[in-house]
Amino acid sequence: MGFESADPGTIRPGGRTARVRAGVLRAAGDALAEQGFAHLDLADVARRAEVGKTTVYRRWGTLTGLVTDLLMDMAEQSLPRTETGSLLGDLKANARLVQRTLADVRQGALFKAVIAAATCDEKTAEALRRFYDIRVQEWAPCVQQAVERGELPEDTDTHEVIRAVSAPLYYRLLTTGDRLDEAAADQAAEAAVAAARAGAYRRSA
Amino acid sequence: MGFESADPGTIRPGGRTARVRAGVLRAAGDALAEQGFAHLDLADVARRAEVGKTTVYRRWGTLTGLVTDLLMDMAEQSLPRTETGSLLGDLKANARLVQRTLADVRQGALFKAVIAAATCDEKTAEALRRFYDIRVQEWAPCVQQAVERGELPEDTDTHEVIRAVSAPLYYRLLTTGDRLDEAAADQAAEAAVAAARAGAYRRSA
């Protein structure tokens, strides 16, 4: 494990309905990672999950509905934040989680596929925004704690600091193709801390 | 104008061959911005450009060939960097250029389409990386000048500072959907300067 989002459908309690959902979301993630959104097909997902086609159509209806549920599941399954006692330590933990996720073959391909889908589908874009909102809300308290310790200006936009850690890593994934290694993660965390200390993320700035 | 990349094919000297290329790239950009890469079609581009289909097939061959040429053209046509005399001034000018480009309806849609295409096509990804390399090389000297003025550590990775300005703006475009306004641009520039001053982009870091 150790990813920003656990592989969909791996740890999940519950009965048959929950197992079916887990299997279908796992299959949808596999299909997306392997073939991208353009080739996603509900019948293929049903086949991969060894579930009846009608079950998939009845429960998710559309590809967008399935991807939306997958993103919701990834947000639900994603790991709680790490607390290290220092802002830099916390943000490095966050950056490495994001970096490991994006550098992982399956998860990186999955995120690329969903982000590509979101560029041309408003509902997928909305589901993606919700996913990031949930992740940002999970991690923002570490920035708030730094504000309370007096390490950062009072009116720091805590959510913006968390987003600043992710931005250079996603930029590498999607545009420059530069290496997504631990050095990139640490640099992202260090840059965010330095900028936050200098007041770049103040709400009044 | 005022965009990171001038609209493809607007200012261009030369004879018929150059005019045909300009018209076809303009049409390809329009089609990409309106419909995305998945619906790009050489015959449709030829129709839009009022050019014979065979001309387009002979010259560009494939969709990927056409998008690669479009990106090369965007890089060639893009504006030279602004020199303001200060690092923050220069990076704000860079950030606002990127922000205006991504916030523009046609250009923003065009970049989304090309980035989405690059997630599933290696040649498009390569062309996209070349586009960013050219833009980064155009702007990196303003960071080098700041190093020479003693404003930044000697071993600052100048290219990484330029990429750091773009990253949060592209992150907004592609994932969070947050507003791409001048405040976002200025924040990106201020954060990059603060982080660079603190040594976050040192090669030895």
Image (tube, coloured by chain):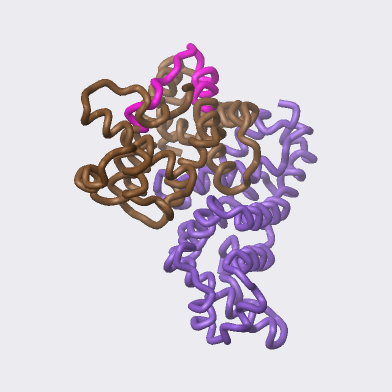
Chain colours: A purple, B brown
Residue B199 appearing in the image: no
Q: Position of residue A105 (x, y in %)?
A: 43, 64
Name the foreground residue: B102 vs B165. Answer: B102
Q: Position of residue A7 (x, y in %)?
A: 56, 70
Magenta-highlighted residues: B74-95
A31 is higher (above) or lower (below) than A138: below
Residue B2 appearing in the image: yes
In this image, A60 relative to B120: left or right? right
Name the foreground residue: A38 vs B196. Answer: A38
Quadrant of the snapshot with the N terminus of chain A: bottom right
Quadrant of the snapshot with the C terminus of chain A: top right
Residue at figure coordinates x 53%, y 52% from the top left: A120
B122 is higher (above) or lower (below) than A12: above
Name the foreground residue: B76 vs B89. Answer: B76
Name the foreground residue: A105 vs A110. Answer: A110
Residue at figure coordinates x 56%, y 83% from the top left: A53
